[in-house]
Amino acid sequence: MDLFPNTRFGFNNRKLKAATIVWSPFVERNKDKNGRDVFEGICMDLLHQLALSLNFTYEVMETPDGEFGTLVNNSWTGLVGLLQREEVDLVVGPLTVTKEREVVMDFIYPFYHDYGKGIYRMPDPVKSKWKTLLRPFKWQVIVALGGVFVCSALILFTTKKAVLHVKTSHKYKYSKDFILTDSVWYTFGTFIKHHARYEHVSGTTKVFVSFLWFFSTIIIAAYSGSLVAFLTVKKTSPPFKTLAEVAKQDTYEWGTIGGSMWVTLFTRSNLTVYKDIWNGVQRFASTDQNVLSSLDGVHKAKVENGNYIFFFDGDIIQLWSEANCDLVMLEETFYQIQYAVGLPNMSPYKKLFSDTMLAIEQSGLLDIWKKRWWPKGNMCVGEQELVARVIDIVDMQSAFYVLCIGLFVGTVILTVEKLRR
């Protein structure tokens, strides 16, 4: 004889009040046949299965402030606040488990695992095309070549002047045929493999010039090969790869969802890099409150406009980069996160819900729901691979700039010479 038959019937068709937050693809708001708002998505499928397994009905409400939950003046906002004040029986959504939240609420067995990531738009390559002729070499190489050029010109001038002499009355004197500007132009011609009219009569000069030609040949070959690659191969290099590099640069601003666990993480963490990120958010928020907007669409628009990095749950923002090939993910992942259904603090039903959640996970239903609601396909597959392309006029603008500079300098010199004469 069963002394407690009701224990087999779960909640005996009791009606529970559930709270959620719209965040695609986990929770989406759509219209039914009668034009009424309904919630759908992975989390709603999960809630329905929990209701079937535990024999309860439910009504769903959206959190009034649109926040996940953060601690403000010793009071929790969003979904966490609703549970803390016992205004709802459970929350179902992409709510992250944190130790701060577990003080005021209970989490059951997690149903989703993810990592924190950042997303941003790559710098516009057209804006830096004028640097094309400088790109094959790093600035250290360019500085070194400049030093070699100056030293070579001085050495050639010294050695050449020492040997270009004429014999007069059994005495030697230096010839005035070879001046410093001749040495500079000779060195410049050597660097661009241009033949000069001067002959070398000194063994020292011959040896030095021979090795200078050899050096120039190597440099020109390396430069030409790299320049061809830069002109014909599409190659994207991220401006930064880690949180530390993001915090040190001043080109991009960054932000995250206001009222989310990311605000709590950045404000309460003892890690220096997290403190630097939060200091940046506060600095940007003084002029743009949207860096802490609770609406993902606001952050997405800022990311697409450029010079902005958005930090959030990796799998969600990964969908943005798959739909827009101009957006890329930060290479570094940070802070492992877990989504779980929330219950009021010290709930006697925590184990019952957790056991049911574990059974749902083992059944494979979560994978089925993800395939149902997760966006299909990736529009940007292969977009980041190296591909050859046709050279455009924009790619060659730096060469035209050099030509214009040469024409300008030549005109100035011609004008000065005319005025002197």
Image: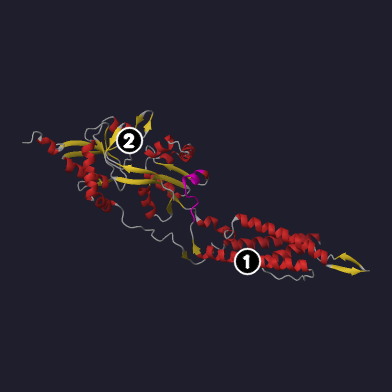
Residue bearing the label numbered 1: 218
Using residue 303 as the reference point, say whether residue 138 is left or right of it.
right
CB under 8 Å between discs 1 and 2: no
Residue 179 in picture, x, y percent from top left: 80, 63
Q: Nearer the viewer, residue 61 or 119?
A: 119
Q: Image quadrant of residue 406?
A: bottom right
Query: Circle 2 — which element?
Result: helix
Using residue 14 as the reference point, say whether residue 106 is left or right of it.
right
Using residue 230 as the reference point, say whether residue 315 is left or right of it.
left
Count how many numbered circles sit on residues in the image.
2
Residue 415 visible in the picture: no
Q: Residues within 10 Å of mark 1 (few under 14, many from 20)?
A: few
Residue 167 in picture, x, y percent from top left: 89, 69
Q: Check residue 78 in the rendering and tell me which mark sits there, or answer none.
A: 2
Q: Residue furthest right?
A: 169
Using residue 395 as the reference point, say whether residue 175 is left or right of it.
right
Question: Residue at horizontal 30%, vertical 52%?
Answer: 374
Q: Nearer the viewer, residue 161 or 135?
A: 161
Q: Which residues are magenta?
A: 237-247
Q: Measure how far apart labels 1 and 2 are at the Cα level.
A: 65 Å
